[in-house]
Image: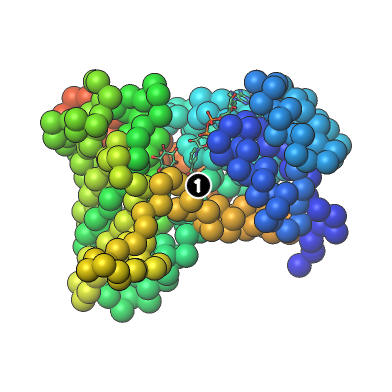
Amino acid sequence: MTQRPHALGVAVIGTGRMGADHVRRIQEVTSGARVTAVVDVDAERAKSVAARVDGCTVHTDPAAAMASADVDAVIVASPGPAHEAALLAAFEHDLPVLCEKPLTPDAASALRVLQAEQKLGRRRVQVGFMRRYDAEYMKLKSLLETGQLGRPLMLHNRHRNVASPPGWTSEMLINDSVTHEMDVTRWLLGHEITAVTVLAPTPSANAPDGIRDPQFVVFETDGGAIVDVEIYVNCGFGYQVQAEVVCERGTARVGDGHAMVTNAAGRWGGIIAQDYIERFADAYDREVQAWVDATRRDEVTGPSAWDGYAVAAVCEAAVRALEEGGRMRVELVERPALYD
Ligand code: NAD
Ligand code: ISE
């Protein structure tokens, strides 16, 4: 197996919350890579992130960074609507990409990316569905693959955030948050999601005006499983992501966060993480290292553009189910051979 002898030069596009964290990660945690360029439409933000990295150039145009001789690969961490342009530019420069979720915000644009990647004739994109790199989710996947528990019948998920950022809408609970459970369902069970129903109780008093929070989302899969997701993005008390698979001969559950339990003063308890950066720190580290290692071997592994497209299609059906009520079928194009 051949591997590039030099460290991978990475351009990070978007230097907000995730982008800045990926820059830190590559510089301080990841081996075999260094950040050579950062890009942000907000030049001041990009400059302040680049100031922490020796020799890093600053750009406001992703294509200019991609044309640099010391850029071998790209991390896209701009908002979802900017992903398609960045991905197509990376394809033109024949650069491998780690693209934060979502691949793109809707199925039509995701399909355009899928078609452009097929024209290249090889995979170029890994999508940032980082739960696949979380130690607990990986154990759960391995257990299901042994078949010991029998066929999965149901998957229960809880996804809670402390508070939604300003400007959130009811659709974003699906498009921004439940996307992770869509990917987890497809990956853990190895099924496609075929239909979606969304129910919403009277909104929590914590929810900003007009936001339908929490929501209860139900998937049906082509493997005959039923999956439910409680999404509650203004729960106030912590960041919690839990999953329990119910199989024919047993159940398995992850995400209880019982790394340390204290007993004192007549009480027992632990600490709840407050955000995804804390809860999934190890998963992001593993995800980026896996991407760097594969890229240096000239391979692409992990969640593919097909996975990004399939999730975008489920999101569209789920948003229709939220808006119109009832059960919506998910329509997918035929899976191209490149993603078999
Ligand atoms: P953010 O708003 O904090 O940062 C986005 C940055 O991109 C901003 O600095 C903005 O100025 C910049 N930007 C906007 N348009 C751009 C363009 N066309 N080119 C270059 N830069 C541009 O957002 P964030 O929370 O860091 O989210 C970024 C991405 O990461 C999104 O796709 C989001 O869904 C994803 N995300 C993933 C996770 C996860 O758990 N995997 C968590 C949070 C966010
Ligand atoms: C955010 O964009 C993420 O991807 C987080 O993992 C998720 O928990 C959160 O709800 C989203 O807003």
Amino acid type of disc 1?
Ile
Disc 1 residue crowd, few under 14, some 14–19, many 20+, Cα 10 Å: some
| Quarter of the figure that contains the N terminus | bottom right
| Quarter of image, res 211 | top left
**Residue 258: x %, y % from top left:** 35, 66
Kindly identify the residue that appears in the image at 79 percent across and 61 percent down: 3
Q: Give the number of marks.
A: 1
Kindly identify the residue that appears in the image at 23 percent across and 49 percent down: 228
Kindly identify the residue that appears in the image at 24 percent across and 20 percent down: 210
Residue placed furthest toward the front:
265
Q: Is residue 141 above or below residue 329?
A: below
Residue sitting nearer the eye, 130 or 298? 130
Q: Which residue is mark 1?
A: 277
Q: Is residue 249 above or below residue 241?
A: below
Residue sitting nearer the eye, 110 or 36? 36
Work out whether residue 191 can be spotted: no
**Residue 152: x %, y % from top left:** 26, 65
Work out whether residue 261 can be spotted: yes
Tag 1's secondary structure? helix
| Quarter of image, res 162 | top left
Tell me the quadrant of ligand 1.
Answer: top right
Q: Is the residue marked 1 within 8 Å of ligand 1, measured from its CB?
A: yes
Kindly identify the residue that appears in the image at 36 percent across and 54 percent down: 272
Left or right: residue 70 versus residue 10 is: right
Left or right: residue 274 versus residue 127 is: left
**Residue 127: x %, y % from top left:** 54, 45
Which colour assignment does the render follow? rainbow
**Residue 315: x %, y % from top left:** 34, 35
Residue sitting nearer the eye, 191 or 27? 27
Left or right: residue 318 versus residue 8 is: left
